[in-house]
């Protein structure tokens, strides 16, 4: 079987549930759908620092949808929230990891909805279209690689085989299989062997090229139960038994990528993929 794209996933709000797509535009900052980019929005605390499932696993219960001209959020016990794409707010500085980034406020109604559901004061912010955030040249070399509110890179790539390998190990321990949503990838490949992505240099889809630049070191987020919004131990404990990468600095699953050619191309589920390897 030749390698193909099996899934495309976009996460409108950092830390909340993603959206599965049949096709997406490949922008220089990652996947886009109808002009809305991956991690276009972020939730911050009252000090302007980003929040994630690491501190608030309950964020895993917030469903996102791109509904015509608005971002739609829904969560257990809450009325649906619609945030118009055309809304204009104030530009403020927020903190995402070590980066200070300009972001646009999304209004009191959105902030109140987020605060009520999370049980702590929080605000919804959108990436300022005039802002520019660049991945570290230590990993991208001469390529200037922009991205929005993702942790460090525009894209995350993994494979169905890698997930199946993990799930075989979980099931051997009598544990439930893990869904791909726990790992929050953008592009999932089929037709490759487990963890082939670890050794890939580039992934080409038509005229588009993605360079894989760094293994994704996993935190506690994959062990958040997406159905309950609660922190657990698995699959983190199982991954720790065979995926500890000393060179990368931790447990890895998936590989971070940047767009090196073909920004503006359309990617689709089922598209054939050409992979070059580092050996």
Image (cartoon, rainbow, N blue to C red):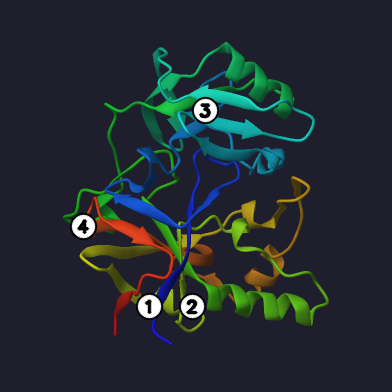
Report crowding for label 3: few under 14, some 14 to 19, many 20 or more residues within 10 A (C-alpha): some
Give the side of residue 220 with respect to residue 177, left or right. Answer: left
Identify the mark nearer the N-term, 1 or 3.
3
- Above or below for 63 versus 120: below
Q: Nearer the viewer, mark 3 or mark 2?
A: 2
Q: Which residue is mark 2?
A: 195
Q: Position of residue 213 (x, y in %)?
A: 33, 63
Tag 4 near tag 3, CB within 8 Å: no
Position of 33 relative to 265 (above/below): above
- Residue at 24% across, 68% down: 206
Q: Secondary structure at mark 2?
A: loop
Along the horizontal axis of the image, is 210 left or right of 238? left
Residue 30: image location, x then y, percent: 35, 49
The residue wearing badge 4 is 262
Q: Quadrant of the N terminus?
A: bottom left
- Measured as percent of width and height from the top left, residue 226 is found at 71, 51
Circle 3: element type:
loop
Within-10-Å neighbours for mark 2: few <14, some 14–19, many 20+: some
Give the Cα separation between the discs numbered 4 and 3: 33 Å
Residue that badge 3 annotates: 49
Where is mark 1, residue-wise? 199
- Look at 69% across and 57% down and name the residue there: 223
Answer yes or no: do the residues labelled 2 and 1 have beta carbons within 8 Å? Answer: yes
Q: Secondary structure at mark 4?
A: loop
Q: Quadrant of residue 117?
A: top right
Image height check: is 59 above or below 1?
above
Which badge, 3 or 2, is on the more N-terminal residue? 3
- Cα gap from disc 1 to disc 4, whole angstroms: 22 Å
What residue appears at the point 51 percent right and 81 percent down from the top-left corner?
A: 194
Residue at image location 55% in from the left, 27% down from the top: 44
């Amino acid at each position: 079987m030749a390698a193909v794209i099996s899934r495309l996933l976009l996460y409108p709000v950092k830390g909340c549930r993603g959206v599965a797509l049949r096709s997406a535009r490949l922008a220089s900052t990652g996947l886009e759908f109808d002009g809305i980019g991956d991690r276009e929005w972020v939730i911050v605390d009252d000090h302007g620092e980003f929040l994630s499932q690491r501190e608030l696993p309950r964020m895993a219960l917030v469903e996102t949808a791109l509904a015509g001209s608005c971002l739609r959020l829904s969560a257990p016990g809450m009325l649906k929230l619609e945030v118009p794409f055309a809304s204009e707010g104030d530009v403020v500085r927020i903190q995402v990891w070590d980066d200070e980034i300009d972001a646009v406020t999304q209004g009191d109604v959105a902030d109140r909805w987020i605060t009520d559901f999370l049980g702590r004061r929080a605000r919804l912010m959108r990436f300022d279209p005039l802002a520019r955030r660049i991945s570290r040249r230590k990993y991208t070399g001469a390529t200037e690689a922009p991205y929005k509110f993702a942790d460090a890179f525009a894209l995350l790539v993994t494979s169905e085989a890698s997930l199946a390998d993990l799930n075989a190990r979980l099931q051997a321990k009598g544990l439930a299989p893990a869904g791909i949503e726990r790992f929050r990838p953008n592009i999932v490949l089929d037709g490759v062997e487990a963890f082939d992505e670890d050794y890939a240099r580039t992934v080409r889809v038509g005229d588009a090229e993605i360079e894989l630049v760094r293994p994704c070191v996993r935190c506690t987020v994959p062990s958040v139960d997406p159905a309950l919004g609660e922190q657990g131990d698995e699959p983190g404990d199982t991954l720790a038994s065979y995926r500890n990468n000393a060179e990368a600095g931790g447990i890895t699953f998936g590989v971070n990528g940047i767009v090196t050619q073909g920004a503006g191309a359309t990617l689709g589920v089922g598209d054939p993929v050409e992979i070059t390897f580092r050996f």
